[in-house]
Every structure is written in C-alpha cells, then in structure tokens.
Amino acid sequence: MANPAPPVHPRDPLAWCLAITGLYALLAGWRLAIPSIPFFDEVHYVPAAREFVALFEQGFGEYRNREHPLLGKELIALGMMLAGDNPLGWRLMPLAFGTLALFASMRALWHASEDRFATLAFGVLLATGFHLFVHSRIAMLDVFMASFLAVAAWQFAGACAQPEKGRWRLALTGIALGCAMGAKWNAIPIAVLPGLVFFAARISAGRRRLFFSRRGAPVPGVTLVEAFLWLGIVPLVTYALTFVPGYWMSEYLRPSPLAEQGLIGLHGNILSLQQQVLTPHNYQSNWPQWLLNTRGIWYLYEVVDGAQRGVLLIGNPLTMLLGLPALAWCLVIGAWRSDWARLGVVIGYAAALGLWLIAPKPVQFYYHYFVPSFFLLGALALALSDLRRAGWGTWLAWGTLAASAGLFALFYKVLAAAPLEGAASFVKWAWLVGWR
C-alpha cells in the first residue's frame, strides 16, 4: 500500500508582502509635506502634539484636545521631535504607522487563511482603497488605532497558526490592543474580540477542566486563565500605561483633569466630551451612506503651495461596493466550512461598524468607516481567491485588482493633494452629489 502524500503547505508570501509594503511607503511618502499647512483635523491634533513637544523640551505645556486619549498625540509629537515642527514632522509617524498597518494586515490574513493570493490581493486592495492612503498622509489619530489593531490581528492569528509561539504572540496581541485603545476609543469593540473568540472556542470544545485545560483551539498549550491574562489584563494595563506621561507631566501641563481627578476622573471628562452635542456639520454622515460610499469629505480644497489642491476621503468606488456581497459570501462559506478566516472578517466588520449604530455620538463622519473597511476588503480578497480557485473567475479576480489600482490612479490627484487645474476641478472626481 502506497504511503499517503504529505500535506501541502502553501509557501509564505513574506517577500511579496514586503515588496508591496515598500512600494506603498514610497508612494504614500512622496511629497508628504504638501500641503505645507495643517489641514482638516490636523488643526486640532498638531497643536495638541506641539504642547507635548513643548513639555518635553521646555518643561511646560497646555492640555489640548481633551476628548481623546494621549497615545496618538504623543506619537505625532515624537515625529515632530524627530523631524521638526513642520509638515514632514507632523506626518512622519502617520506614514510609518500606515505602512505598518498594511504589512500587519497582510500578515494577519496569511496566518488566518494560508491563502497566498488572498493575502497579496488584500495588500493591493488596502493600498488602493483610498482610506489607508489618505490617513497615512495626515496627522490624525485613526491611523495609529488601525495600525495597532492590525498588529493585534497579526499576532493573534499567528498564535493560532503557530501554537509553539502562541504565548509570546498572545502577549504582543494584548499590548497592541491596549495601544489601539490608547490611540482612540473606537478600538474597543475590536479589542474585546480575541478574548471572546478564545473563550468561545474553549466553551464549544466542552472540556471538563474549562479554565485550566491546555488542549484544543484556538491556541493549544495555553489555558483559558492564561489567555485572560494576555487578552484581558495586559490590554488594560498597557492602556493605563499610555497615560503615564500624563501623570509625569500633570504638574506642568495645565489645566489637567489627570492631575486634578486621577485616571478615573479623566475618563469621565473624556466621556462627557465625546457625548457632547456638536453643531451639525456639512460633511457629517451616517452608516448607510458609509456602506454605499455615497458621502465623502473634502479634507482639503483650497489654493495652497502655489496651486489649487484637494484631498477627498471616499472609498474606492469599486471595491467598497464589491466588498458588501463578498461579506455575505464569506459569512455563508465560513459557516458552511467552519472557516475562521472568513468568519473572522465578517465578525470584525460587524463589531467595528456596530459601534456606530449604537454610539451616543450625535455627529459622525465617513472616516469612522476606516476600520470596518479593513475587514470589508479582507472579505473581498478572500472572495476573489475563491473565484480564482473556481477557474472561471480567474479573470474576474485579477480584473478587480487591476480596476482597483486603475481607480486609485484616476483619483490620485485628490488623494495626495497634487496640483489641480482650477477651482472647478473637483467636478472631475465628484461623481455623486454626496462627494461634493
């Protein structure tokens, strides 16, 4: 009797992931210092970061932008200390973390699926999906949150795929989750998912020694009690540690709720600011508009640096819509095959978007769809891979990637603040009324 054939293990596309990431960094970093003025929410975050720089360099500063945690503004300040208080310094760390988000996202999907085509397709879709590119070139907090979440997904998927490295990968997962929350609270619905997945997997296995058994998915060799340490306690401790500079500087940074009320009081202050009723904004939108990509935001549209320039935040007009049936496909196939990569993108999307269905934040914007778009494009990458394996969908899969890149090239001028022909140039890209 012939010996059975050994199992086939797809080759890790690490080199291709690095190549895509490197090309993305070069493109996103090209003329990063344009525009030379703060634009959109940089007018809030750059002054807040500037106060951190003043605190570290001169010993005093003012506490600004109180409605968000400190980590994202500290990272912007780090870029300013490295490259100066100038447009390059403001945007250096967003570029670095946007690039990291791309690489980590590809690695997460690879460890979760071991699907070479889906992994590389995901990189192409993310790089040309508009959201990541725009946020890699502006000093806002969202790119830090998204990057830390991507790192957490990478490490958690790696722990599940390589149990022999599970312990330290789970520890890194917890640290990244804590940093994500320390950048922006929007990360919280995603941050709880790894722990819930671990708990659900052990419950479904029906182990008699539920809390102390080392057997079974998702990470053999790690007990539920230990997983609670890495995925429950470590994120909270890490999150608290992101406020340590606030304790250190509270004597010098005034007025400071951290100094006056402590960490609990500070969070009450942040929560009250998050829930305040804001004046309606011309660019506010809601989640149905996000799903259909019908409402964008002009982050910039003015004459600056000697030319008319614009930065438009919308999603890629093709992939944002194709991603919706791809999510449905992943839900059905994932449930049928018990495929956790496909179920994971659906669960992640639902959690990230679900926050905005219940969040007590009266004015919402399309950039809140940034994190859900990662899962959406992950679902599309997996669906395209299924089409390619089916044979008849090969050209459709490659054609979608080519079309995504083509649309990115078409919109590049209003994604990268390139010079435009004149004041009425926006009509070339404002295909929908909601994009004006």
Image (tube, grey):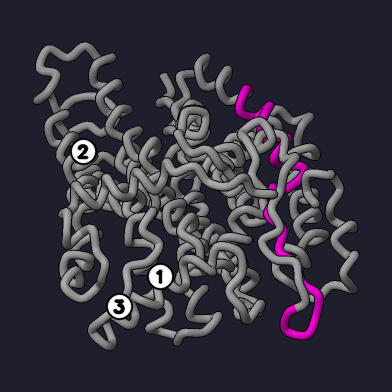
Q: Amino acid at mark 3?
A: Gly
Q: Which residue is mark 2?
A: 232
Residue 270 percent location from the top left of the image: 33, 49
**Residue positioned 38% across, 69% down in the render:** 75
Residue 405 percent location from the top left of the image: 75, 55
CA gap between label 1 and label 3 equals 9 Å
**Residue positioned 42% across, 41% down in the render:** 275
User: Of the residues under marks 1 and 2, which one precedes in the sequence?
Assistant: 1
Q: Which residue is mark 3?
A: 61
Question: Is residue 323 magenta-colored?
Answer: yes
| Disc 3, SS | strand
CA gap between label 3 and label 2 equals 34 Å
CA gap between label 1 and label 2 equals 30 Å
Quadrant where the N terminus lies? top left
Question: Residue 48's mark?
Answer: 1
Residue 116 percent location from the top left of the image: 56, 45
